[in-house]
Each structure stands twice: as structure tokens, then as C-alpha cells.
Image: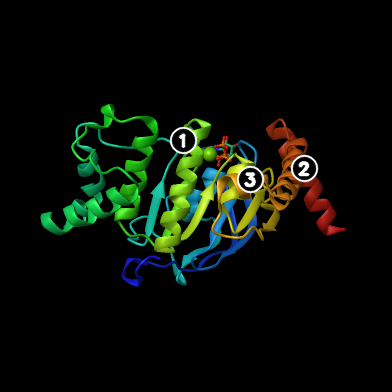
Amino acid sequence: MPSESERIGGENLRIDDLWFSYGGKLSIYEGLNLDVRPGEFLGVIGPSGCGKTTLLNLLAGFYEPEEGAVTLRGQPIKPEDPHLGYVFQQPTLFPWLSAIENVEFGLRMQGMGEAERRERAQHYFNLVGLMGFEDYLIVRLSGGMQQRVNLARALAMEPTLLLMDEPFGALDAITRETMNDELLRIWDTLGQTVLFITHDIDEAIYLSDRICVLSRPPGGIFRMLDSELPRPRHGPTTRTGERFWGYKKSLINDIAEVTAQRPTSEEEIALLKRRKKIEESD
Ligand SMILES: Nc1ncnc2c1ncn2[C@@H]1O[C@H](COP(=O)(O)OP(=O)(O)OP(=O)(O)O)[C@@H](O)[C@H]1O
Ligand SMILES: [Mg+2]
């Protein structure tokens, strides 16, 4: 069991009546609402182009909502919020720094002293299973190891909200499954709120407490699936259980339905929006 002192905990993330479009043309969200519980692991899936990364950028405060609010602990989110951590699909590591120096980077930017930041970085470096590779340059690490450095770098900031955008998408299936288990072990220890975006239905089911299926823009949430899979999850048992297959079937159908609704051009999107407005005024 983790010691209480290791536990960072998570905080409530809320999205209220969020509207967002790119330059007023392509409307992505029209009145999105989402409430993520403290310490919850929320998976977000949806077909390519449905607005997953846009959502993450809004949650990270990189984009401003046109209307509505995104709040953490009841306060509007700002990109410089120290409670936020991000892990993107492609590790954005500095090739001229060693692996551990990459993990220390954000702490150095925060002005943390050398001894303290090395100790903190080493702690998370060990937690992701990289002991012994501290002095390696990034080019000498495998893709999976680079993604571990990326994860350790985000964790070292001790965020209470961890935003992850297809972080293991570029890894092979076996490494991805190992990383899924590592992530769950770390989350179990630290207890942050996690929002995890993925294309992969199995990955979403394996990791999450709830799974949010996004519609095509500007549809918002198509379905919210509450998972009753017991924890701790265990690859061979969890992935082959009946419940897992039940969720998988249901999500495959959801994704097929969302994909089939796909508008193919801006004209079609405009048409759908006009139709929606007419229906609402009826
Ligand atoms: N900076 C931008 N300017 C204009 N349109 C954008 C911009 N970024 C994304 N889009 C459009 O917004 C829509 C949603 O994009 P987004 O990147 O959020 O999708 P996604 O669900 O993350 O897709 P993927 O699974 O392929 O990563 C797409 O139609 C995309 O073309
Ligand atoms: Mg994306």
C-alpha cells in the first residue's frame, strides 16, 4: 500500500455549458457539460476529428471557451496552473538533456533548488521504472522509455489533474499494455484526477472508471459509460472477463454509430446545424 505522504489526491474538474469553435466557422462544442470527480480516471474516446484534442486544449487553458467555463477546484483553469500536468502523444523531450534532467526541467523552471529537484525527479524516475537510465540522452532510449520519461516529467510537477492525449498511441501493443499497468499502479498510489484520451476501446475500458464517448462536432457527449470492472485490474483476468466484452461490444456500436453520422463537408455541417436549429424552434 502507498504511504499517505505519497498521495497527491485529485480535484473536481467541471465543464459548464462550454461553447467553442475554430474561428467562428467549425463549431466543435455547443453547450458541453462534464463533471469529473476528484481522483476519478475518466477515459475519453471518439473517432478521429471529433474534438478530443480540442477538449484537452480547452481543459489545459490553451484555448479559451467562447462561452461557458472550465474550472478546477471551482477556479477557471489557466495553462500555468501548477495543479495541471500534461502528457501528449509524442514525447516532447529535450534531446540535449539527459533523461533525469528532462524530468527536472519543469521543477528548475519553478525555481526549485538543485538538491530538492534531483530528489523529487529521482522519486518519479524510479516510479516509472527507469532506474539506472538517469544519464542516458533521449536518443539512446526506446519509444516506451521515452514515454516513461515524459510521464515522469509530468508526475514530478505533482499535478492533481493529469491530462493525457493518446500518450501510448505510438507504442506497440505489448509495451502499451505494460504502460497501462504502470499508469494504473502510479494512479493508485498518487490518486490524481486523470482525463485520458484514446482511440483504443480496450485501453479506455481497461483503465477507466467512466468512459465518455464523444460525438461528431458539434455533438458533445454521445454516451457516458459507468464501468463496474473491479480494481485492481489485471491484464489476463480483466481483459477476458464477460463484463469487459460487454462494454467492448457496446462501445464498438457507439463508435460505429458516431462514425456513420459523420458529415463529410463543411456544407453538410452547416446543413445539420440549420436542421438542428429548425427542430429546436418547432
Ligand atoms: N487549430 C485548428 N484550426 C482549425 N480547425 C482545427 C484546429 N485544430 C483542430 N481543428 C479541427 O477540429 C476538429 C477536431 O479536431 P481535434 O484535433 O480536436 O480532433 P481529435 O478528436 O483529437 O482527432 P484525432 O483522434 O485525429 O487526434 C477537426 O475537424 C479538426 O480539423
Ligand atoms: Mg487528437
Q: Helix, strand, or loop for circle 1?
A: helix
Q: Helix, strand, or loop for circle 3?
A: helix
Task: Tell me the kind of residue under disc 2.
Answer: Asn
Q: Is residue 24 above or below residue 158?
A: above
- Marks 2 and 3, the one that precedes in the sequence: 3
Point 49% across, 45% down: residue: 180
Task: Tell me the kind of residue under disc 1.
Answer: Thr
The spot of residue 69 in percent (x, y) is: 52, 63
Q: Nearer the viewer, residue 201 or 51?
A: 201
Discs 1, 2 touching: Cβ within 8 Å: no
Mark 1 and mark 2: span between their CA atoms? Answer: 27 Å
For residue 42, which quarter of the picture?
Answer: bottom right
Point 18% across, 37% down: residue: 135
Instruction: Name the quadrant of the C terminus.
Output: bottom right
Please indicate whether residue 221 sits to the left or right of residue 58 in the image: right
Dot label at residue 175: 1
For residue 239, which quarter of the picture?
Answer: top right
Dot label at residue 239: 3
Mark 1 and mark 3: span between their CA atoms? Answer: 16 Å
Q: Helix, strand, or loop for circle 2?
A: helix
The residue that mark 2 highlights is 253
Could you classify mark 2 by the number of other residues whose Cα lies within 10 Å: few (under 14), some (14-19), or many (20 or more)?
Answer: few
- Residue furthest left in the image: 114
